Amino acid sequence: MTTTSTCSNSSTLTATVVPPHQRSRFWPQHFGSIPQWLILEAHVFGWLDRLCADYYGGSWDFYTLSNGGAFMAPEGDERWSLFNSMNGNGAEMGAEAAGITACLIAYSHHACRTESEAMTDHFYRLREYALHHPDSRAIFALID
C-alpha cells in the first residue's frame, strides 16, 4: 500500500508500507546510525499512549517515505481522538496521522536528547510528509 502526498513544489512524496519480511530491518536500516535508536519504537508507543485515552496497544505498520524518511502507525482505518495536555489541543484523525503525530513528537525529543543530526533529518522528512497529509491540521494542532 502506498499513500501519496503532493508538496508545494510540485514534487510528490509517497509513503509505502514495509512488507512483513522486511520489518526486522526497518529500525536498523533507517535509524541504526542514531544513538540509542533501540528505544525509539517504545517511545513512539508511549507517546500515542499519552495522547490517546483509547489506545491499548495493537499492531502497527512501518512506512518508508520517498524522501528517505520513515515512520510507523497503528494498523487499520479507524479514527482516533488525541489530546496533548502540554499544549491543550485535541483532534480527531486517522490511524496513519496518529502514528505520524506520535513519531514526530518522539523524533523531536530523541533529536534533542541525543543531539543527533541524523535524527533531526528524520524529523524534518516526516514533517514534510505531514505538511501535506489529509489530516495535517490535526497533526500540527497536537505538535505545535
Image (cartoon, helix red, strand yellow):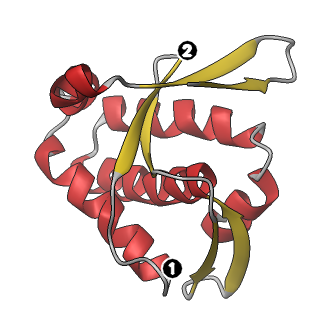
The image shows residue 82 at horizontal and vertical percentages of 60, 77
Q: Quadrant of residue 106?
A: bottom left
Number of other residues with Cα within 10 Å of mark 1, as a class: few under 14, some 14 to 19, many 20 or more = some
Residue 86 sits above or below residue 96 on the image:
below
Residue 33 sits in quarter: top left
Q: Residue at x 14, y 40 (%)?
A: 35
Q: Which mark is residue 3?
A: none
Q: Residues within 10 Å of mark 2 (few under 14, many from 20)?
A: some
Residue 48 lies, in percent from the top left, at 43, 69
The answer to whether residue 48 is visible is yes
- Residue 98 placement, left or right of 71: right
Q: Which residue is drawn at the image coordinates 53% and 53% (left, top)? A: 76
Determine which residue is flagged by label 2: 66
Please tell me which residue lies in front, 95 or 127.
95
Residue 44 x %, y % = 34, 59
Give me the C-alpha separation between circle 2 and circle 1: 28 Å
Question: Can you say whether 6 is above or below 50 in the image?
Answer: above
User: Which residue is outermost to the top?
Assistant: 11
Q: Mark 1 points at which residue?
A: 52
Question: Where on the picture, by quarter, is residue 5?
Answer: top right
Nearer to me, 97 or 110? 97
| Mark 2: amino acid | Ser
**Where 77 sits versus 22, above or below?**
below
Q: Which of marks 2 and 1 is in front?
A: 1
Q: Which of marks 2 and 1 is nearer the N terminus?
A: 1
Q: x%, y% of residue 90?
A: 70, 81
Q: Is mark 1 on a helix, strand or loop?
A: loop
Which residue is at 67% across, 19% downward?
13
Helix, strand or loop at mark 2: loop
